[in-house]
């Protein structure tokens, strides 16, 4: 089978290797499509520590081609989305329903304590507990179940109450998914802060009430002037400047969610007195759980998230490096890869 392998920072090699065989509790999936995530970009650029060589890719969907001897819930020909986070199901976090914080978490091509080869490949062997049947949902849309599951997990962390005012800092792909999920989750006023005009326009089309250019006006004053106190500010970029900006936007009693993936050596300063005096919270969100993944599939099946408006570029495996280069240049929104092409 063909795979796209990171052999070093800024180096992708397409090569052939043996097709994996499913274990007794696994299913073998022919990968139809795999989205390119910012986490993949961090691995490619060397900003996220991984052991090279490795096959990234963790936003995928495809067709079941064989099943392990203990599997009776799926059969050849079933259409599935893949949850790449494989918990141990035995530690305290897993037993508490917080599998994303598993003490021995394994990721299929993503970021975790243990990383195994991912879905920038023609086939992947996956534990049967890590797939959801998608019925007749198209594969490209189904591949968004993983990032959408992460977004749902993040919104769960901030305890969104119907009618609250929310600011999303960053209008890339994940910021646009956050905007849509906030809208379907009952947010009152949604403001998008994004310097790229085309992304602001997309955000307004997908559910934001306002979209501002942070390079023209200071968001920490312009947004409160526009909408009053901000209940929740969600940082979807992963940079110290935008993290501080999001926190500066959060009003008394509000919550700041760090959703973007910051560099591992990043530090940001906050005033603990301000947190104390105004009862402001800083929360974070990592990955997804089986529950949020299943909920994501349901939202996609019922048309709650517009994926077509977000996918701007499509590639075969040989185009993965081009996808990374476009992401570094902030060109377009979602990139997807078709491993069989």
Image (cartoon, rainbow, N blue to C red):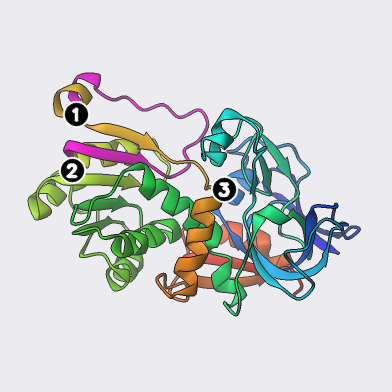
Q: Quadrant of residue 207?
A: bottom left
Q: The residue tagged with tag 1: helix, strand or loop?
A: loop
Q: CA distance from mark 3 to mark 2?
A: 28 Å
Mark sitting on residue 39: 3
Q: Which mark sits nearer the N-terminus, 1 or 2?
A: 2
Residue 250 inside the magenta-drawn segment:
no
Q: Name the one closer to the observer, 232 or 136.
A: 136
Counting every numbered tag in the picture gives 3
Q: Disc 2 designates what residue?
A: 220
Query: Where does the image place residue 106, in percent across and percent down from the top left?
Result: 68, 40
Position of residue 152 relative to residue 265, above or below, is: below
Q: Position of residue 298 (x, y in %)?
A: 48, 67
Residue at the image point whose x is 61% and y is 76% from the top: 135
Marks 1 and 3, how far apart in space? Answer: 32 Å
**Numbered range of the magenta stretch:** 251-274
Q: Position of residue 62 (x, y in %)?
A: 69, 69
SS of the residue at dot 2? helix
Residue at 24 percent across and 22 percent down: it is: 271
The N terminus is located in which quarter? bottom right
Relative horizontal placement of residue 91, taking residue 147 as reference (left or right): right
User: Mark 1 sits on what residue?
Assistant: 279
The quarter of the picture where the C terminus appears is bottom right
For this rendering, which residue is in front, 117 or 101?
Answer: 101
Residue at image point 36% right, 28% down = 268
Q: Residue at x 60, y 71 (%)?
A: 134
């Amino acid at each position: 089978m063909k795979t796209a392998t990171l052999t070093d920072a800024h180096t992708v090699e397409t090569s052939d290797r043996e097709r994996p065989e499913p274990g007794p509790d696994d299913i073998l999936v022919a990968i139809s499509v795999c989205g390119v995530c910012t986490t993949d970009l961090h691995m490619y650029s060397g900003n996220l520590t991984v052991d090279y060589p490795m096959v990234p890719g963790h936003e995928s969907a495809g067709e079941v081609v064989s099943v392990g001897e203990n599997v009776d819930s799926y059969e050849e020909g079933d259409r599935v989305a893949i949850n790449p986070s494989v918990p141990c199901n035995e530690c305290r976090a897993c037993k508490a329903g917080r599998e994303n914080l598993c003490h021995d978490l394994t990721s299929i091509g993503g970021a975790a304590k243990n990383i195994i080869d991912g879905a920038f490949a023609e086939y992947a062997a996956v534990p049967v507990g890590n797939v959801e049947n998608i019925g007749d949902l198209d594969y490209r849309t189904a591949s968004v179940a993983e990032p959408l599951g992460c977004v749902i997990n993040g919104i769960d962390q901030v305890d969104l109450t119907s009618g609250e005012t929310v600011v999303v800092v960053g209008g890339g792909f994940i910021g646009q998914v956050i905007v849509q999920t906030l809208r379907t989750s009952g947010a009152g006023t949604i403001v998008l802060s994004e310097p790229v005009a085309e992304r602001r326009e997309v955000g307004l089309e997908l559910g934001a009430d306002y979209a501002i250019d942070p390079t023209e006006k200071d968001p920490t004053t312009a947004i409160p002037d526009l909408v009053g106190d901000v209940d929740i500010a969600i940082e979807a970029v992963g940079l110290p400047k935008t993290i501080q900006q999001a926190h500066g936007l959060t009003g008394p009693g509000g919550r700041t969610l760090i959703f973007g993936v910051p560099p591992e050596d990043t530090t940001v300063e906050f005033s603990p007195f301000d947190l104390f005096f105004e009862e402001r919270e800083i929360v974070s969100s990592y990955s997804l759980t089986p529950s949020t993944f299943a909920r994501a599939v349901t939202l996609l099946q019922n048309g709650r998230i517009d994926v077509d408006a977000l996918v701007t570029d499509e590639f075969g495996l040989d185009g993965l490096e081009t996808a990374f280069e476009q992401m570094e240049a902030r060109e377009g929104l979602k990139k997807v890869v078709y491993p069989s092409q």
